[in-house]
C-alpha cells in the first residue's frame, strides 16, 4: 500500500515537472465556474429564511398562510414635516390635499401584482361620503369625530398616517419595493409631507440594499490590505502578489460550486467572502515563503525548490484545512439556517483555497520564476559580451 508521504512526493514531482498541465486543468475549472457562478440566486433575509420549517412558530405561520392567505404586510408612512413658517405647506394630516394625494397613490399601488389588498383612512372616508373622495377639510374633520376607527390609520396628533398593504402569498420583496417606490415617484409630492416605506417585508430589502455595498467595500479593503502587507513582508512585487492568486482563484471556484450546489446568497452570507480571504491567504503565504527559502538557501532550480516545498508543506496545510472544515461544518448542527449556510460556504471556501494553493499557485510560481530567471540570464549574457 502506498503511504501518504509517497503520494505527496509523487504529486510534488508531477506538478513541478508539468506546471502547464496543472494550469490548463485549473483554467478549465475556472471556465466551468464562470458558468455555474451565474446560477447563484440572491435572497432577502427574514425570520423564515433563518429558521427551519419544523420550528413551531414557522409551522404555525405556514398553516395560517395555507388557510387564510399571506399574513405579510407592508405600508406607506406619511408624516407632516413643514420646512417654512407661514407657508402653504400641509400642517395637518386631515388636509384634503393629503387625502387626494393618498387616493392617487392607492390607485397606482393597487395594480401591483405583489399586493392583495390596500387599506387606508381614505377608504373609510369614501364609504362615509357615499363612495366619493371628500374634498373639504371640515367634512374630513367631522368624519374623525364620528368614526374612531379612522384613528387606526392616523396618529392622535394628526401628524402621521399609514397606508397598509396586505401582500399576496409568495410575493417578491424586490418587486414589491420597486412598485412602492414607483408609486411614490408617480404622484407629485405634497409640500410639507414626507413619505417613507415601512414593514418588515420592505425593511429586509432596504437592509440588503444598504449591506451589499458595505460588503463590497469590505472585500475591497480586505484585498488592498492584504496586498500592502504581502508586498511589505516579502519585499518583492512578484512574491507579494503570487499568494493573492490563492484567494482570487479559490473564491472564484467557491462561487462556482455555490452556484452548482444551488445555495442562495444573502447580505449576511456575502460577508463570509472577507473571512475566506483572511483564512485562505495563509495557504498561499506558506507555499511562497517556503519556496523562497528553498530557492535561496540551496540554490536549486524552481522545479526542485517547489518539489521540496510541497513535500514539506502539503501535509501541515491539509491538517489545517481539515481542522477548519470540522469547525465550520459544526455551524450546521444548530437550527439557525443562516448559520448552516455560512458554515457550508466557508467550508467550500477554505477547501478551494487549499486546493488552489497546492495546484495553481505552485504551477504559476514555477512558470513565473523560470521566466524571470531566463530574462536575468539573457541580460547577464549580454553584459558579459559587451
Image (spheres, rainbow, N blue to C red):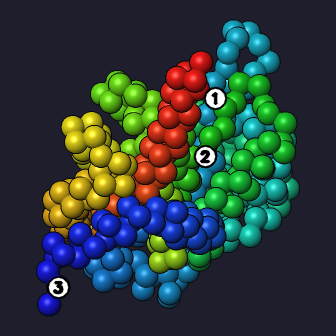
Asked whether residue 196 is in view, the answer is: yes
Q: Is residue 143 left or right of residue 373?
A: right
Identify the residue shown where x is 69% and y is 42%: 142
Give me the disc on residue 80: 1
Q: In this view, does 324 lie above or below 300?
A: below
Residue 282 appears in the picture as rendered: no
Q: Is mark 2 on a helix, strand or loop?
A: strand
> What whole-number distance in Å separates the C-alpha atoms at marks 2 and 3?
66 Å
Residue appearing at x 37%, y 49% in the figure: 302
Residue at coordinates 71% horizontally, 54% vertically from top-left? 178
Q: Which of marks 2 and 1 is nearer the N terminus?
A: 1
Q: Quadrant of residue 221?
A: top left
Estimate the spatial distance between the alpha carbons at disc 2 and disc 1, rounded to whole Å: 15 Å
Vertical arrangement, residue 47 with respect to residue 239, above or below: below
With 115 as the anchor, is 24 left or right in this view? Answer: left
Q: Observer-nearest residue: 340 or 30?
A: 30
Asked if 373 appears above or below 360 in the picture, the reply is above
In the image: residue 168, left or right of residue 18: right
Which residue in the protein does label 3 denote? 2
Disc on the earlier residue, 2 or 3: 3
Count of numbered tags: 3
Residue 342 screen position, x and y as percent:
34, 62
Q: Where is residue 326 in the image (x, y as percent from the top left)?
A: 18, 68
Front position among marks 2 and 3: 3
Q: Where is residue 129 in the image (x, y as percent from the top left)?
A: 80, 55
Q: Residues within 10 Å of mark 2 (few under 14, many from 20)?
A: many
Residue situated in front as seen by the camera: 288 or 229:
288
Quadrant of the frame with the C terminus = top right
Report the quarter where the N terminus lies. bottom left
Where is mark 2, residue-wise? 197
The residue closer to the viewer here, 19 or 238, is 19
Mark in front: 2 vs 1: 2
Amino acid at each position: 500500500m502506498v503511504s501518504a508521504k509517497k503520494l505527496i512526493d509523487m504529486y510534488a514531482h508531477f506538478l513541478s515537472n508539468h506546471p502547464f498541465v496543472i494550469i490548463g486543468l485549473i483554467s478549465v475549472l475556472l471556465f466551468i465556474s464562470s458558468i455555474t457562478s451565474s446560477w447563484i440566486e440572491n435572497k432577502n433575509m427574514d425570520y423564515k429564511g433563518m429558521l427551519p420549517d419544523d420550528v413551531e412558530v414557522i409551522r404555525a405561520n405556514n398553516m395560517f398562510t395555507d388557510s387564510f392567505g399571506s399574513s405579510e404586510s407592508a405600508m406607506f408612512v406619511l408624516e407632516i414635516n413643514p420646512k417654512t413658517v407661514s407657508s402653504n405647506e400641509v400642517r395637518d394630516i386631515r388636509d384634503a390635499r393629503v387625502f387626494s394625494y393618498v387616493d392617487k397613490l392607492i390607485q397606482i399601488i393597487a395594480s401591483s401584482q405583489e399586493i392583495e389588498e390596500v387599506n387606508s383612512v381614505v377608504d373609510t372616508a369614501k364609504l362615509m361620503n357615499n363612495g366619493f373622495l371628500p374634498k373639504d377639510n371640515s367634512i374630513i374633520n367631522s368624519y374623525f369625530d364620528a368614526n374612531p376607527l379612522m384613528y387606526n390609520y392616523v396618529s392622535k396628533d394628526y401628524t402621521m398616517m399609514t397606508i397598509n398593504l396586505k401582500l399576496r402569498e409568495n410575493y417578491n420583496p424586490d418587486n414589491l419595493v420597486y412598485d412602492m417606490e414607483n408609486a411614490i415617484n408617480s404622484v407629485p409630492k405634497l409640500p410639507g409631507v414626507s413619505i417613507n416605506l415601512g414593514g418588515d417585508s420592505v425593511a429586509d430589502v432596504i437592509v440588503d440594499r444598504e449591506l451589499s455595498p458595505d460588503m463590497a467595500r469590505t472585500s475591497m479593503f480586505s484585498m488592498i490590505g492584504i496586498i500592502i502587507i504581502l508586498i511589505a513582508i516579502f519585499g518583492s512585487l512578484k512574491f507579494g502578489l503570487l499568494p493573492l492568486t490563492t484567494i482570487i482563484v479559490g473564491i472564484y471556484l467557491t462561487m462556482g460550486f455555490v452556484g452548482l450546489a444551488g445555495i442562495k446568497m444573502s447580505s449576511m452570507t456575502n460577508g463570509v467572502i472577507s473571512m475566506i480571504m483572511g483564512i485562505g491567504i495563509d495557504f498561499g503565504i506558506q507555499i511562497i515563503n517556503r519556496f523562497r527559502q528553498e530557492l535561496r538557501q540551496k540554490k536549486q532550480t524552481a522545479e526542485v525548490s517547489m518539489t521540496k516545498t510541497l513535500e514539506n508543506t502539503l501535509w501541515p496545510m491539509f491538517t489545517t484545512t481539515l481542522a477548519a472544515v470540522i469547525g465550520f461544518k459544526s455551524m450546521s448542527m444548530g437550527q439557525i439556517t443562516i448559520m448552516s449556510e455560512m458554515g457550508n460556504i466557508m467550508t467550500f471556501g477554505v477547501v478551494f483555497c487549499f486546493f488552489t494553493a497546492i495546484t495553481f499557485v505552485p504551477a504559476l510560481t514555477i512558470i513565473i520564476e523560470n521566466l524571470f530567471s531566463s530574462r536575468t540570464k539573457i541580460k547577464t549574457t549580454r553584459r558579459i559580451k559587451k
